[in-house]
Amino acid sequence: MKAVYFLLLFLPFAASACIDENDVRSAIPQRIVPPKVNFIFAPIFDSNISTNEPSANVTALLSLSKDGTVTKILKLEIFPKSLPKEPIIQSIEKARFFPKTDNSIPVEANEFDFDWEFDIRTGPKIDIDLEL
């Protein structure tokens, strides 16, 4: 009976001593997790824009840093096309993303496809009448 306990206890350790560590690492699949949006604020447009659309769609190609900030906007497509680009660009530049990870290590994402839909909001109309 002692021999059975000895074999059950010692055999796993003896078998693991014969395994090459590099073979084990290469057998583990490389896990790459793409970036995800942490937060982004919808842009607020001037009250003088004219569009009948209630929402907008943005498709962008972004470069992201290791900490999830936007480093560069490579490509930008906006629908409806009548919307001004500047408020949308400002919102994208202020956005934060969970970074791309390679085996749980944050890395840069050079070409991240970003699709975004948001409601079109305008600022309040303010009429100022000055009598001098």
Image (cartoon, rainbow, N blue to C red):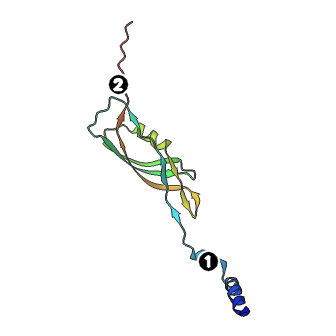
Residue 116: x and y, percent?
39, 48
Residue 16 is marked as: none
Instruction: Specify few, some or many for label 2: CA neighbours under 10 Å numbering under 14, 14-19, or 20 or more.
Output: few
Tell me the element at label 1.
helix
Looking at this rendering, what residue extends furthest in the front direction?
1
**Dividing the image into 4 quarters, which one contains the N terminus?**
bottom right
Where's residue 17, x and y in %? 70, 83
Q: Which mark is residue 24?
A: 1
**What's under tag 2, amino acid-wise?**
Lys
Judged left or right of residue 21, residue 87 is: left
Q: Earlier in the sequence, mark 1 or mark 2?
A: 1
The amino acid type, in three-letter code, at marker 1 is Val
Q: Which mark is on residue 125?
A: 2
**126 shown above or below 71:** above
Q: Residue at x 37, y 8 (%)?
A: 131
**Looking at the image, residue 122 lies above or below residue 91:** above
> Would you call the spot at circle 1 few (<14 residues within 10 Å), some (14-19), or many (20 or more)?
few
In this rendering, the answer to whether 65 lies above or below 47 is: below
Please tell me which residue lies in front, 99 or 76: 99
Q: Position of residue 77 (x, y in %)?
A: 36, 47
Q: Secondary structure at mark 2?
A: loop
The residue sitting at 51% across, 61% down in the picture is: 33
Task: Kindly identify the residue that appears in the image at 46 percent across and 39 percent down.
Answer: 90
